């Protein structure tokens, strides 16, 4: 576990996270910390918590919406890393 933590501690992004991305990350961390792993239940927690979609989309959180939001964020972070490298 220490080796994994050490590697993650030095992880960098190609761009800073937006406020909405950070809020989603914090909410996901809180949901997963409870032991929840079902995306539909996690989406329900996001909905109850009033977490805004980083994409700006509207409507209720569902597992499909959560998966799409995460895919969009990952693609954006990958593109930023490819363009800017580490440490933006």
Image (cartoon, rainbow, N blue to C red):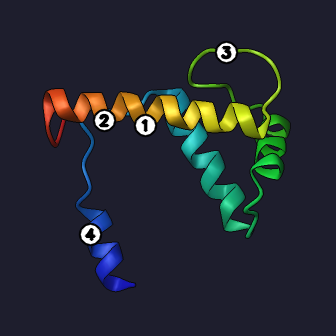
Residue at screen point 29% across, 82% down: 3
Q: Where residue 9 is drawn, which disc sits there?
A: none
Residue at image mark 1: 74
User: Residue at image x 61%, y 15%?
Assistant: 56
Distance CA(mark 3)–CA(mark 1): 17 Å
Disc 2 is placed on an element classified as: helix
In terms of sequence position, does the residue under pointer 3 or pointer 1 come before the other? 3
- Locate residue 53, reporting x and y percent: 64, 25
Q: Residue 7: give its label.
A: 4
**Which residue carries the number 3 mark?**
57
Q: Quadrant of the N terminus?
A: bottom left
In this rendering, which labeled residue sits more in front, label 4 or label 1? 1
* Callout 4 secondary element: helix
Side of 62 relative to 9 (left or right): right
Spatial CA span between label 4 and label 2: 18 Å
Q: Name the residue under label 2.
A: 78
Mark 2 touching mark 1, by CB under 8 A? Answer: yes
Q: Which of 60 and 23 is in front in this view?
A: 60
């Amino acid at each position: 576990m220490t080796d994994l933590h050490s590697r993650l501690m030095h992880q960098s992004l190609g761009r800073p996270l937006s406020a909405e991305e950070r809020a989603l990350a914090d909410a996901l961390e809180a949901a997963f910390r409870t032991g929840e792993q079902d995306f539909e239940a996690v989406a329900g927690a996001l909905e109850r918590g009033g977490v805004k979609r980083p994409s700006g989309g509207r409507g209720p959180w569902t597992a499909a919406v959560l998966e799409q939001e995460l895919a969009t964020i990952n693609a954006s972070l990958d593109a930023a890393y490819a363009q800017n490298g580490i440490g933006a």
